[in-house]
Image: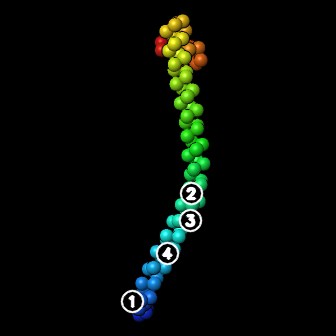
Amino acid sequence: MNTYRPTQSSNYWMVALKLLVLVLGLYISALVLGKIFTWVFTITFFLIRFIVFFGVSFIVLHFFLKLLFKIDLLQFVIGKRFTLR
């Protein structure tokens, strides 16, 4: 059986060393992941903005064509196969 028990002062140094390694690891991961997530969030933001822009434009164009000229843009785009019978 192992009867070694570290002294109280060496135990404090080990805790301090582990906390220092933890803080340094978190700092380095924040630096690296910050750069990665900046690019990911930028690309995602522009993709969502692009999709929303075209979706809203399509809905507004569909509404005005239906209101002014009685043209169903949705039926024109996807065809008659998806209409209710």
- Residue type, mark 4 in image: Leu
Q: Is residue 74 visible?
A: no
Q: Amino acid at mark 2?
A: Leu
Residue holding disc 2: 33
CA gap between label 3 and label 4 equals 12 Å
Q: Is residue 18 above or below residue 78?
A: below
- Circle 3 sits in a helix, a strand or a loop, which is it? helix
**Residue 65 drawn at (x, y percent):** 54, 11
Q: Position of residue 49 (x, y in %)?
A: 55, 34
Name the residue rendered at 60%, 48% in the picture: 39
Query: How far apart in space, not on screen, are marks 2 and 4 (Cα)?
Result: 20 Å
Q: Report the residue marked by disc 1.
A: 8
Dot 2 or dot 1, earlier in sequence: 1
Q: Amino acid at mark 1?
A: Gln
Q: Does 27 sit above or below residue 4?
A: above
Report the Cα–Cα distance between label 1 and label 4: 19 Å
Tag 3: amino acid? Ile
Residue 38 position in % (x across, y down): 57, 50
Q: Report whether 2 appears left or right of 30.
A: left
Q: Which residue is mark 4?
A: 20
**Front-most of 82 and 59?**
59
Looking at the image, is mark 3 or mark 1 earlier in the sequence? 1
Residue sitting at x 60%, y 43%: 43
Q: Viewed as shown, does residue 14 lie left or right of 76?
A: left
Tell me the mark number nearer the camera, choosing from 1 and 4: 4
Q: Which mark is residue 28?
A: 3
Sequence-earlier tag: 2 or 4: 4
Q: Residues within 10 Å of mark 1 (few under 14, many from 20)?
A: few
Reading the chain from its start, which is encountered first: label 3 or label 4? 4
Confirm whether residue 12 shows in the render. yes
Which is more N-terminal, label 4 or label 1?
A: 1
